[in-house]
Amino acid sequence: MLAVVYHSPNDLRVEDVPMPKIGEGELLVKVISTSICGTDLRIFHGNHRMYKPETVRIPGHEVVGTIAKVGAGVKNYTVGQRVFCAPNTGCGHCQQCMTGNNNLCANYDAIGVTSDGGFAEHAQADELQKNDHDCC
Ligand SMILES: [Zn+2]
Ligand SMILES: [Zn+2]
């Protein structure tokens, strides 16, 4: 699939890369659109703390698409369903997570920031956030 790949500050390349592999509890999203925001500009210019030197990654964290494939154990999504990917996941236990600021968690992850994201034809997403729990 085609993707925009960050190689170094001010060096984004359109490349043919492997399709994301989908594991248990994960989804393959066929990307319709991915927004560009200030975080992406910081990444592009080499000013994002999670893009350390030597990082090669597909940015893009504001992703809308349709489910192309569901991994084993996925319960709440079906192929063809339109989704927005909530990009940030936190530990679920710290003060920031407990107050809804999981993007400020010291142990946060985010698609397009700590893993490959949506500036691509397809993106991988988790069904559940790390801090989701069976409560209701
Ligand atoms: Zn953003
Ligand atoms: Zn946390």
Image (tube, helix red, strand yellow):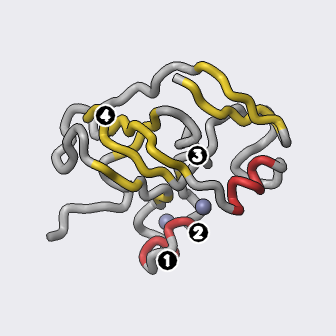
Compared across the picture, whether 55 is left or right of 111 comes to right
User: In which quadrant of the rendered view does residue 13 lie?
Assistant: top right
Measure the C-alpha gap from mark 3 to mark 4: 19 Å
Please name whichever residue, 102 or 9, is drawn nearer the observer in this view of the structure.
9
Of the two numbered discs 1 and 4 in the rendering, the one whose residue sits closer to the viewer: 4
Q: Which mark is residue 95?
A: 1
> Residue 111: image x %, image y %?
52, 47
Of the two numbered discs 3 and 1 in the rendering, the one whose residue sits closer to the viewer: 3
Q: Give above or below for 26 relative to 90.
A: above
Measure the C-alpha gap from mark 4 to mark 2: 30 Å
> Residue 129: image x %, image y %?
37, 55
Measure the C-alpha gap from mark 3 to mark 1: 24 Å
N-terminal of the pair, mark 2 or mark 3, is 2
Compared across the picture, whether 120 is left or right of 135 comes to right
Q: Residue beneath label 2, please?
A: 104
Of the two numbered discs 2 and 3 in the rendering, the one whose residue sits closer to the viewer: 3
Compared across the picture, whether 107 is left or right of 26 comes to right
> Residue 109: image x %, image y %?
53, 52
Q: Residue beneath label 4, please?
A: 68
Please name whichever residue, 36 or 128, is drawn nearer the observer in this view of the structure.
36
Kindly give the residue lying farthest to the bottom in the view shown: 99
Amino acid under disc 1? Gln
Query: In which quadrant is the C terminus drawn?
Result: bottom left
N-terminal of the pair, mark 1 or mark 4, is 4
Disc 4, SS = strand
The reply to whether callout 1 and callout 4 are in contact (CB within 8 Å) is no
N-terminal of the pair, mark 4 or mark 2, is 4
Of the two numbered discs 4 and 2 in the rendering, the one whose residue sits closer to the viewer: 4
